[in-house]
Image: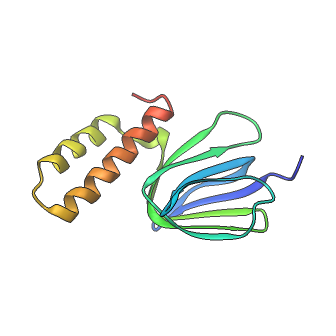
Amino acid sequence: MADPLEVEVVATDRKVWSGEATMVTFSTATGSIGIMPGHAPLLSVLRDGPVLVRPPEGDDLYIAAHSGFALVDDGKVYIMASSAELASDIDVAQAKSLMEEAEASEDGEGKERALQRAQTRLLVAEKAGIS
């Protein structure tokens, strides 16, 4: 078996998670991508969506990531997001409330951005079994 990936997920204001993984998936401008040890170098735009980190041992880890970049190089994966949070840190009631506010908003582009963030947070919480 190949050496595990070294993964670092950072937001503009903090390090969200760091550790080893056998697989990482995330959303790019052209769709979802899965990264495993030995993957070719890659630089991609990161879109709002769930990041799945599969550690060598233990449960899968889900992270809500919102826009940024992803870099894969030499067995390392860097997810650099404008904001990101672990599924365990998501307040589902707050995310639902923010989604309702966004749906009621009349600010076209701002509304779409707020809706996408709320939907991503709720999707990540659902995948992680948080309700």
Q: In this picture, is 97 found above or below 80? A: above
Q: Position of residue 22 (x, y in %)?
A: 75, 47
User: Closer to the camera, 99 or 30?
Assistant: 30
Q: Residue furthest right?
A: 1
**Residue under the point 34% across and 36% down:** 92
Q: Is residue 82 visible?
A: no
Q: Is residue 50 left or right of residue 90?
A: right
Q: How many marks?
A: 0
**Residue under the point 26% across and 55% down:** 114
- Color style of the picture: rainbow
Q: In this picture, is 78 found above or below 34? A: below
Q: Is residue 68 left or right of residue 57?
A: left
Q: In this picture, is 113 found above or below 131? A: below
Q: Is residue 101 visible?
A: yes
Q: Position of residue 55 (x, y in %)?
A: 71, 43
Q: Position of residue 111 (x, y in %)?
A: 20, 57
Q: Is residue 93 left or right of residue 22?
A: left
**Residue under the point 79% across and 68% down:** 74
User: Closer to the camera, 85 or 67?
Assistant: 67
The C terminus sits in image quarter: top left
Q: Position of residue 23 (x, y in %)?
A: 70, 48
